[in-house]
């Protein structure tokens, strides 16, 4: 993991990762094969942009306060192997990829919280981890509704 020399370095890193998530979901939205899939990914791109804006605001205003809340984990992402595709991604593959990405972001922010230099920064990264966990849960529920209930 990258070493940070200041709070701004940490916040810049988080901002960059949120922008990558925005780009990821916008890319999936543009390659979506149906409107439901496109709308789902556009919604997530907007939410990730909201995370980026929140971090930018924190950086500019120095506001570092979040509430704690438990998030359910169905652990579906732990048991699905990402399907690779040379061509277009199916809705199932896109959901699996999104679950894995959200799980990775959750783990990243959790790890960053362990290395945080202050309690406020730790709280920031724990809050971001919770947000990513909520996103993963939403994709897991979507996956369960569309693919697991049929079997």
Image (cartoon, grey):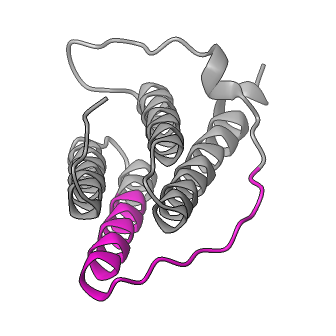
Where does residue 131 sit, x and y in percent of width and height? Answer: 55, 58
Question: Which sits in the foreground, 28 or 22?
Answer: 22
Where does residue 114 sit, x and y in percent of width and height? Answer: 53, 42
Residue ID at (35%, 83%): 62
**In this figure, what is the number of numbered marks?**
0
Figure quadrant of the C terminus: top right
Residue ID at (44%, 37%): 108
Question: Which sits in the foreground, 142 or 128?
Answer: 128
Question: Which sits in the foreground, 58 or 133?
Answer: 58
Give the answer, above or below, for where 45 lies relative to 25: below
Answer whether residue 94 is magenta in the image.
no
Figure quadrant of the N terminus: top left
Where does residue 110 sit, x and y in percent of width and height? Answer: 54, 42
Please give left or right for residue 45 compared with residue 100 in the image.
left
Residue ID at (26%, 75%): 56
The range drawn in magenta is: 42-71
**Residue 150 is drawn in which quadrant?**
top right
Please give left or right for residue 101 compared with residue 7 in the image.
right
**Residue 127 is drawn in which quadrant?**
bottom right
Classified by dominant secondary structure, the portion drawn in magenta counts as helix
Give the answer, above or below, for where 22 lies relative to 69: above
Answer whether residue 66 is magenta in the image.
yes
Give the answer, above or below, for where 99 lies relative to 8: above
Where does residue 20 sit, x and y in percent of width and height? Answer: 22, 47
Residue ID at (25%, 34%): 2
């Amino acid at each position: 993991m990258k070493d940070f020399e200041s709070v701004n370095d940490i916040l810049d890193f988080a901002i960059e990762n949120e922008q990558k998530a925005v780009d990821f979901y916008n890319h999936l939205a543009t390659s979506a094969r149906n409107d439901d899939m496109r709308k789902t990914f556009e919604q997530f791109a907007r939410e990730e942009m909201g995370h980026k804006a929140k971090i930018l605001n924190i950086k500019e205003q120095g506001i570092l306060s979040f509430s704690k809340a438990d998030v359910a984990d169905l652990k579906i992402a732990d048991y699905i192997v990402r399907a690779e595709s040379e061509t277009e991604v199916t809705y199932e593959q896109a959901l699996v990829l999104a679950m894995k990405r959200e799980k990775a972001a959750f783990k990243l922010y959790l790890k960053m919280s362990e290395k945080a230099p202050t309690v406020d920064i730790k709280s920031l990264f724990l809050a971001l981890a919770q947000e990513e966990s909520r996103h993963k849960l939403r994709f897991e529920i979507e996956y369960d509704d569309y693919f697991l209930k049929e079997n």
